[in-house]
Amino acid sequence: MQQIVQQGEDQALRSRIQVFQRFDENPLEAESGLIEEANCFKVKGIPGPAFNKVRHLNGEKRAAIKDIEAWYGNTRFQIEVTPYEANKKLFHSLHKNDFYQTGFHSSFMGRTIKVAESALTTSIEIRPLGEKEFEDFADVYVKSFGLPDSIKEGVRQNNECLRDAEGWSFVKAVDKGAIAGIAAVYVENNVAVLASSAVLPAFRGKGIQRALIKKRAEIAKQAGAAYITGEAAFSSASHRNMIQCGLELVYTKALYNKVT
């Protein structure tokens, strides 16, 4: 199960980075690399751990962290450690290089058909996001997470560029004519990934997140994906929604950041 989850997570992030790289002259400075079996993802133009992260570091190569730091340069990044890759050597190496645990994040997986057919009673409509609605997508995303309006245009651009990319689909939740939530799903090699998702505070508690999960599973089923995966903060409302829709907790990752 963990291999399917890791495959899906890596595929979705790699797809985003490949699309960013197609922009003229790669203005976001997006790239990915393999350093001592660790998958490294970097988008210098978008600070933060969403795109700047390291996966599958196992601690067997003592020089790996130094090599990884050199590859990232002055771009801050996060290291994800799953229970399947964790060992004393890795933890010692992280500590020695001034990386300390800053949180947890959970990964889930389910059979696509089970999630698509999960029971849900709601008056909320889930529709495809229109070509000209990515500004609304960004507005909902920013307001849902309490982010500054100054990043709204960046959120719009970074998702609109995926509109015609293979494997990507975007949906919106509509309540009495108003957009209440948004979400994305990515499908590749038999695995679907529940990507970005957000619901405006005024519309929470109506089952919208579950409706968005179910609709994306239906899209994934039609695309031939046997499995669907997702991520959420440990023990959060999103965590509970994943479980209620038929996904299972596969593991919880420890998150490590450099202390400066």
Image (tube, helix red, strand yellow):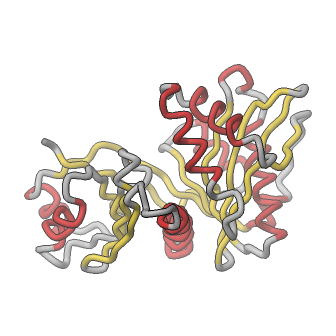
- On the image, the x and y values in percent for residue 134 come to 69, 42
Q: Residue furthest top?
A: 202
Report which quarter residue 216 is drawn in.
Answer: bottom right
Query: Residue 168's spot in the image, x, y percent?
Result: 69, 62
**The quarter of the displayed image where residue 48 is located:** top left
Quick check: 81 left or right of 88?
A: right
* 157 left or right, relative to 78: right
Residue placed most toward the observer, 47 or 260 = 47
Query: Based on the displayed image, in which of its 4 quarters is residue 139 positioned?
Result: top right
From the top left corner, tell me how far across and down residue 90 is, in percent: 20, 67
Q: Relative to 54, say whether 223 is above or below.
A: below
Note whether residue 76 is visible. Answer: yes
Q: Position of residue 221 (x, y in %)?
A: 81, 68
- In the rendered view, would you say 208 is above or below 116? above
- Asked whether 64 or 178 is in front, the reply is 178
Marker count (numbered): 0
Q: Residue at x 36, y 45 (%)?
A: 47
Residue drawn 8% across and 58% down? 96
In this picture, residue 21 sits left or right of residue 92: right
> Residue sitting at 69 percent across and 68 percent down?
167
| Residue farthest left in this picture | 96
**Which image quarter holds the N terminus?**
bottom right
Q: Is residue 90 above or below residue 216?
A: below
- Identify the residue at image location x=88%, y=39%: 125
**Residue 5, can we see it?**
no
Q: In the rendered image, which quarter contains the C terminus?
A: top left
